Image (cartoon, grey):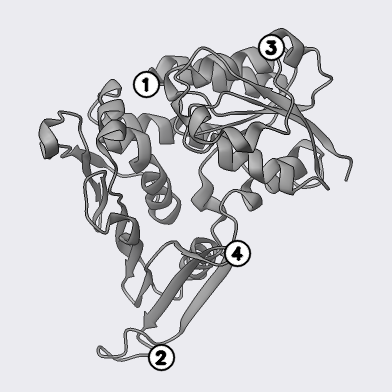
């Protein structure tokens, strides 16, 4: 595959430094031209400055004229669509961190630009490429666990005061910022809901008033699913899990990710009526990993840009997902 000449726009997003590390580590497929610091908070940049030391810093004009094929956009979510539109207008493929603008019309306008241009757009939903989730999706599509009637998806954390204060800028709080990952998984597993019930809240921890608790119920014809995400939960990082309940069996990915030497792992257990009893829920267990969280996602993006694999994203789905994220986040 011809190397993809690429650059990073923005450093404020939590995934900016990991994305740059992934681009550098996959030098067999990426030719990293540099990064651009745009009009945003520099806290994340200062916290990860060593990651950027060996990468050229470009102005925006220099970046547009660097002979690029693509960009990765890791700005604050409030301005990410703005820069994605600018990149598309310069003929560049875009990998952009999730979930996109708080303004659905802006998001739709951006997607329509990519539809019209034929350029690749990949949102940063990293769990789409998690090996345990991919296996769970395969099992669901095979019909092995029957008709799905419930998905329970959680992505929790214990964040410091500074992060929860930062979160105040988003009316949708944690459901908008992080819960979007889990909403994507619910929709991939179960399809579009008939009703969305947002139940987001503020824990009041340390008198910080951001919506640091995200909770939403997704109603389906034959059941209900939920997404939960928190920024104030002790042990929250180990409470990232997906449970898929079907009429013939259950899949549990728990934890969805945990740190090991060399990256992350996921533990998945499958109980179905053919191979396990009510007290054998840990039958057919498997660990997936270690893997580096963003590597598979960015490699998939490169393959699409290079024309080596079919475009694996339905942009109409991305529009619907964004709409549902905003509803679940209380917009």
The residue at the point 34 percent across, 78 percent down is: 248
Q: Which residue lies under the disc numbered 2?
A: 275
Q: Quadrant of the C terminus?
A: top left
Q: Secondary structure at mark 2?
A: loop
For label 1, count other residues whose C-alpha is less than 10 Å away and answer few (under 14), some (14-19) or many (20+).
Answer: many
Front position in the image: 79 or 208: 208
For label 3, count other residues whose C-alpha is less than 10 Å away and answer few (under 14), some (14-19) or many (20+).
Answer: some
Q: Secondary structure at mark 1?
A: loop
Q: Nearer the viewer, mark 2 or mark 4?
A: 4
Mark-to-mark CA distance, 3 and 2: 59 Å
The residue at the point 67 percent across, 17 percent down is: 87
Where in the figure is residue 163, as x and y percent of width and height? Answer: 31, 34
Q: Is residue 201 left or right of residue 236?
A: left
The residue at the point 45 percent across, 23 percent down is: 76
Q: Which residue lies under the disc numbered 3?
A: 59
Front position in the image: 136 or 177: 177
Q: Of the numbered discs in the image, which one, if any, rests on residue 102? A: 1
Mark-to-mark CA distance, 1 and 2: 45 Å
First in sequence: mark 2 or mark 4?
A: 4
Q: Which residue lies under the disc numbered 4?
A: 262
Q: Is residue 48 left or right of residue 251?
A: right
Where in the figure is residue 296, as x and y percent of width and height? Answer: 65, 52
Mark-to-mark CA distance, 3 and 1: 26 Å
First in sequence: mark 3 or mark 2?
A: 3
Q: Nearer the viewer, mark 4 or mark 1?
A: 4
Please identify the quarter of the rendering in which residue 310 is found.
top right
Residue sitting at the far right? 2
First in sequence: mark 3 or mark 1?
A: 3
Q: Is residue 193 left or right of residue 123?
A: left
């Amino acid at each position: 595959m011809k190397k993809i000449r690429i650059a990073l726009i923005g450093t404020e997003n939590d995934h900016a430094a990991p994305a740059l590390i992934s681009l550098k580590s996959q030098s067999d497929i990426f030719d990293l031209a540099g990064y651009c610091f745009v009009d945003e908070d520099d806290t994340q940049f200062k916290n990860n400055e060593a990651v950027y030391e060996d990468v050229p810093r470009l102005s925006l004009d220099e970046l547009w004229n660097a002979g690029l094929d693509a960009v990765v956009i890791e700005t604050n979510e409030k301005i990410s669509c703005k820069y994605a539109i600018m990149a598309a207008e310069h003929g560049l493929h875009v990998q952009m961190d999730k979930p996109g603008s708080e303004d659905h019309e802006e998001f739709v306008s951006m997607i329509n630009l990519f539809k019209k241009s034929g350029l690749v757009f990949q949102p940063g939903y990293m769990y789409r490429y998690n090996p345990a989730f991919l296996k769970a999706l395969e099992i669901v599509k095979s019909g092995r666990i029957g008709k799905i009637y419930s998905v329970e998806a959680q992505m929790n954390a214990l964040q410091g005061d500074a992060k929860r204060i930062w979160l105040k800028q988003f009316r949708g709080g944690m459901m908008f910022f992080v819960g979007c990952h889990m909403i994507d998984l619910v929709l991939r597993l179960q399809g579009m809901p008939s009703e969305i019930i947002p139940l987001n809240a503020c824990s009041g921890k340390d008198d910080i008033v951001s919506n640091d608790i995200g909770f939403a119920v997704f109603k389906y014809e034959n059941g209900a699913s939920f997404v939960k995400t928190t920024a104030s939960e002790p042990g929250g990082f180990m409470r990232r899990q997906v449970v898929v309940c079907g009429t013939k069996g259950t899949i549990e990915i728990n934890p969805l990710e945990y740190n090991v030497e060399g990256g992350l792992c996921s533990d998945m257990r499958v109980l179905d009526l053919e191979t396990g009893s009510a007290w054998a829920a840990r039958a057919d267990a498997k660990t997936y990993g270690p893997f580096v969280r963003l590597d598979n996602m960015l490699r998939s993006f490169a393959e699409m840009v290079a024309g080596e694999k079919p475009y694996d994203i339905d942009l109409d789905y991305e529009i619907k997902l964004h709409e549902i994220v905003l509803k679940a986040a209380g917009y």
